[in-house]
Structure formats: C-alpha cells, structure tokens
Amino acid sequence: MLALSGCGGQKPPANTVVMVIESSPTNLDPRVGLDAQSEHIDQLLFDALVQHNNHFGFAPDLAVSWQTPDPLTYIFHLRRDVRFSNGQPLTSRDVKWTFTSMMDGTVITVKAGSYEDVRSIDTPDAWTVVFHLKRPDNSFIENLADGAIGIVPYGSGRNFGQHPVGTGPFEFVSQRFDRDVVIERAPHSWHAEPKIRRVRFDVVPDATTRALELEKGAADVELNSLPADTVTALMQNPNLVVEAEPGTNLNYVVFNTRDAILRHVRVRQAIAAAVNRKLIVQSLFRGRARLAESLLPPEHWAWTRTPPHDYDPALANRLLDEAGYPRGRDGIRFHLSLKTSTDETTRLIALAMQDELAQVGIALDVRSFEFATFYADLTHGAFQLAISRWIGGNEQPDIFRYTYAASAVPPYGANRGFYNNPDVNQWITDAQTAPTLAEEKQDYAKIQQTVARELPTLDLWYLDTVLVHTRRLKHVRIVPFPSGNFYFLETVELRQPRS
C-alpha cells in the first residue's frame, strides 16, 4: 500500500508543521485530560510548577525555587515574567485556583484524587504559593509536574477545555473533534520562541493512512504511531528520516481481579507463562522494545529486579491444572474475553496472545473497539482482560499508588482491575511517608516483588521512542524525552524550499 504514495495529497502550508496522531485529545483542560494526546498537546500549551529532568527528578518551571521546611509544607516561589496567551499575568491566585477547582468539585476530574492530601493552599503574595498537607507525601511534587497538571487562569470552569488558555510556548487556535487540533506560537510566552509558527495535529486513526500521508508529504511527522514493519518500509524512502531511542512507554495487560476466573492468582500466573513476550517483540516490533518486569523503567532509582516471567507453556498448563481448570474434551479449559482499541499493533498483540493461550487450553475472544468506547469500558471495569499503555505516567513511583492502591479504583485512580492487597496498600502509604530515600526505595521494592508474583497486571515491554519525519524538518530532537512527548516541536525548524 505504501507504493501508492504518488497519489494526490495536499502539501502542508509553508509556515505549518503537520503531525499525524491516532485520536483526538479527549479534553485539553490539563486538570481533566488523561489520554496521551491530551497530555502531550497540553504540555505545549501549559506549564506546571516544576518539570521533569533527565534523571526522573524535578527542575524549575513556573516555580523558580521551592522549599519543604517540614514534611507537611511546600513553598513555591513563582517566576514574575509569565503571561497567559491572552496577555493576563500569571500570579499565585491562578495556581491556587488550578488545584482548588479540582478539590472542591468545580471541575469534575479523576485527577482530584492526587490532591486529597492537601489541607489548604495559601498565597501570602502574588509570587508565593504554600501547600499545607494533611500527612507527609513523598510523591506530592510529582503531581505538580508537567504531564500531571498545567496551571490555568483563575476562574476557569468546566468548559475551559473547549478554548484553553495557558502559559506555554504555543497557544490554542482550534479543535475539530476527530479531525484536527491547531496551535500556534504564543505571543506572550516566557519560553524561548519556537522556530515554527503553527502546528496542525491531523487525526488519522488508520496506521497505513498515516504512513501514506508521510510518504506523500501531506504530513511532516508522526511519533510512536506506526507498526514496526511500516517503519522499516519507510526507512527505504530517501525523503523520510527515522529517529529512534530506547523509551519508557509501557504496554501491559490488566486483569479484572473481580472476575470469577481471573481472581485466581494461578490463572494470572499461567497466562503470564503462556505469553511469549520475546517472540512478540521480535516479530511485531522488530526488536524495538525491551521486556518489562515493572511499571517503572529499569533506569529509575526506585526500580528493583523481580523474577522474570519467562515463556513456559509447561508451567502454564501445570498452574491451570492446580487452579482447578482441567481441559475439556475439546481441549478448552475456559473462555476469556480480551478488549483492545482498534489500534492495529495492539490488535496484532491480542491475536498473538490468542494463539499462545489456545495452546494451553484458554479460548481467548478478542474484541476491538473505537478508542473512546474502549477507554470507557476500561475505566468502568467492563472487561476481563484488556491491553493498555502507560505513556510517561510510569516514570515516577507514584504510579504504584495510582495503579495498585485499593483507594485508587476508578473514578479515583487507575486501579482498573480492582486489585486489593492490604500489604501493598500499607507499603504504598509507608513509601509516601518514609523519612529517608533508602526506606522509600525499600517499600517500593516490596511492592514490585509482590505485584510481580500476584500479577494484577502483566507488564509486557517498554517501547522504543520512534519518530518518522520528512526532510522538510530539521533539528528534530527526541532525546532526552523517553516517553515520547511533543517537546521536540519547541525547537524543530522548517527547511526553506529551494528557489
């Protein structure tokens, strides 16, 4: 199909970069949007109090400095040269409103659960914000960082996402749902001025069509949205460039632990043993992924080594027998349903799992849905198994609270499989209040060891960050952003056409 690249295709405007994305952002209010497209575009429109650095720590953003005089107090000192894209100066009142509007229900959002430990917020002057906590929380600052939140103007209400106003290097222009989102260089930004004037994110759900748009020159760039075979084919095109680096985005399978079959640990362990992850990485991703045994990437300070989930169909058969599920006359032990989005690569993963589980007597019914429907079912627990991704959210250890704490079931978090282990709940609390980094790391190690054994989720692999762009773009820099966000658009340039 890539040979059809000579057909038609409108070239991007001279001052516009066109990026193809898989789906529309669900909500561009940074207090609300949770999907990858919302968060990545929001990071260009908004700033947070702090930003992530190259070592999974934090650096100044809207806050030039901060102090924690005691475990219950965080004091942030704001930059004084920041304006929103409408020209309004940013002050501590805007920062306070961003968080109180979530905490008091002015804006209905899952993210409110991340600030449940906030007792009060003071603004002693226009440039100082003081958070008072109910209890110590070592992960609190993560919830103030880019990707987690963006600061909005005072008074922003529930419809703010329809026309967002931020302090980032770009400003919102328009959105046509399921068609495109347009942003352009912000006139009042305190950031270094982007080299490009405008970006249009074209929503193209089909991966083959995204590749064709790149080949035709109708689009300039994509990021982490093409199957490995397609990327390999595009590498032969002299007009395209492929940039790739090891990444942190995680594919995983979530089990509904309330399900009559999947509530058995041995069944979940058997499924893990029946899935040949190494073969899938080689065949579907052409080796552009690393096997995962934890939510955290192995470069993270809190990561710990756990026993690997090796491919072992003999072990899978034995575990299923022990769990009380012998094969029937037709060789089938039981049926399960696996839900996915319509993303082609995800569907291929599901079909590979279907074939592998059949070999140990599990009949897997694969059901694919448009992303919004799939995501709604995922958040409501309307599934047995589902394949999903963490994009950036798994770069901080608060992901364990958000994913495994009993208090984090939807709508209060992302414990979508309704996992509940009292020991894990306690270690999560202990880690949040640990007086030293060594003790915090020890608590996270115990969490990782336990969930690796009980498998409320099966971590599959960390995907490489792979970006394909036309030679119309120059100075494309995906390092040091392993989760594959869109920050490269702040520094990318357009080559001038030859006269």
Image (cartoon, rainbow, N blue to C red):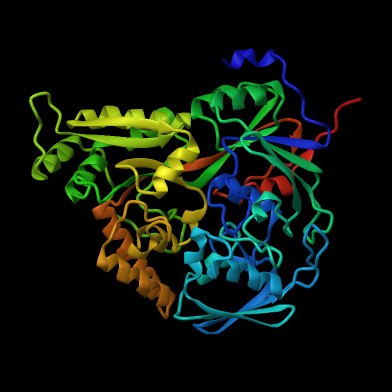
Q: Say left or right for 377 vs 101.
A: left
Q: Name above or below for residue 101 compared with residue 291.
A: below
Residue at 30 percent across and 65 percent down: it is 424
Residue at 42 percent across and 81 percent down: it is 435
Return the residue nearer the eye: 324 or 303: 324
Q: Name above or below for residue 109 compared with residue 277.
A: below
Question: Residue 181 at x, y = what percent?
Answer: 69, 40
Q: How many marks?
A: 0
Question: Residue 190 at x, y = what percent?
Answer: 79, 62
Q: Residue furthest right?
A: 499
Question: Residue 304 at x, y = what percent?
Answer: 36, 60
Return the residue nearer the eye: 214 or 263: 263
Residue at 83 percent across and 32 percent down: it is 14
Picture quadrant of residue 100: bottom right
Residue at 44 percent across and 34 percent down: it is 287
Q: Say left or right for 174 vs 422.
A: right
Q: Say left or right for 6 vs 427.
A: right
Picture quadrant of residue 358: top left
Q: Name above or below for residue 373 compared with residue 402.
A: above
Picture quadrant of residue 102: bottom right
Return the residue nearer the eye: 16 or 395: 16
Q: Name above or below for residue 481 compared with residue 73.
A: above
Return the residue nearer the eye: 12 or 414: 414
Q: Say left or right for 449 vs 158.
A: left
Residue 182 appears in the picture as rendered: yes
Residue 484 appears in the picture as rendered: no
- Split into 4 quadrants, where in the image is the N terminus? top right
